[in-house]
Image (cartoon, grey):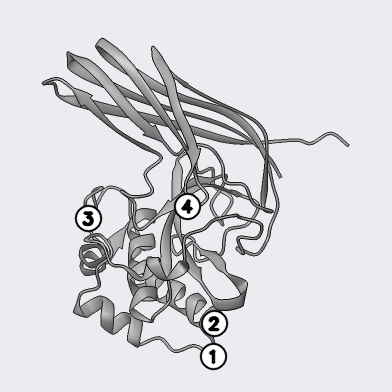
Amino acid sequence: MKLKITHETSYSYDTPVEALVQSLRLTPSVHEGQRVCEWHITVSSGQRGVAFRDGAGDWIEGWSVRGPVDTVTVSINGMIETRDTAGVLRGHRETVNPIVYLRDTPATKADEALIRLARSVKGDDALDLSHKLMAAVAEAITYTPGVTEASTSAAEALELGQGVCQDHAHALIACARECGLPARYVSGYLHTSVEGKPHDAAHAWAEIHVGSLGWVGFDAANACCPDERYVRLGSGYDAQDAAPVRGMAFGISVESLDVRVHVEEVQQEQ
């Protein structure tokens, strides 16, 4: 599948800020399931700084903006070819030992309810257990936009019984770690939902390390493994750690955010 992606994030300030620094994890991962045809990142009035690939295999770019400035826009325009690898992350080079992803964070720490949910699931092996954990989380948390916030933890989402893809990913990570399986949060894009509805938004899912297969993606929000509709950007312990854009503004001001994402399938030439 060939996908055209446009992603625009605008930061507005009620009072101009003196400067802005950002760390961007917005370049698609290098692995067998996707190939970048073209990819352009721009930051309005920004200057690109140091760029590097971290131990998890993610490409990080530093950007800075000199003020005074009241609006900063981060824009992505790209084309990428994807193929279905049944969720298996093949050909992705990284140096971090998977066992580090057994570490809890405030967003993924399992409370008694999450522990009960994890322990209620039995599997024939790590892969089977991971699929069943995904199904259990999908059943326990109904996809409902607008009821949770960026700061909502996995435990809070499970108590509500509602949430979005971030909450599903956090809950699945918590359950997998409780079962002794390394798990991490993945940020990216999704072309359509499993029902075929357009999904013009950034997306998130979990990856679980299942022995000889290595990292395998599990999207509890859609109860499936990532296929050719998914574009992987980067990973981390949780949503905050894997955030595509992280930064700091210098000055006293109130920030507002506007995000627009469009993922479109492009017909490939015969």
Q: Which of marks 4 and 1 precedes in the sequence?
A: 4
Q: Which of marks 2 and 3 precedes in the sequence?
A: 2
The amino acid type of the residue labelled 3 equals Thr
Q: Nearer the viewer, mark 4 or mark 2?
A: 4
Q: Residue at x 41, y 40 (%)?
A: 244
Please name the residue that numbered disc 2 is placed on. 128
Q: Give the label on residue 152, or none.
A: 3
Q: Is residue 164 visible?
A: no
Quarter of the image where the N terminus is located: top right
Q: Is residue 215 left or right of residue 115?
A: right
Most foreground residue, 43 or 260: 43
Q: Give the label on residue 124, or none.
A: 1
The amino acid type of the residue labelled 4 equals Gly
Q: Is residue 144 left or right of residue 220?
A: left
Name the element at disc 4: loop
The amino acid type of the residue labelled 2 equals Asp
Most foreground residue, 86 or 263: 86
Above or below 150: residue 123: below
Quarter of the image where the C terminus is located: top right
Neighbourhood count class around disc 2 (C-alpha, 10 Å): few under 14, some 14–19, many 20 upward:
few
Label 3, label 4: how far apart the Cα atoms are: 27 Å
Name the element at disc 2: helix
Whether label 1 touches label 2, CB < 8 Å: yes
Label 4, label 2: how far apart the Cα atoms are: 28 Å
Q: Which of marks 1 and 3 precedes in the sequence?
A: 1
Please name the residue that numbered disc 4 is placed on. 55
Residue 102: image quadrant is bottom left
Residue 184 x/y as whole percent? 41, 62
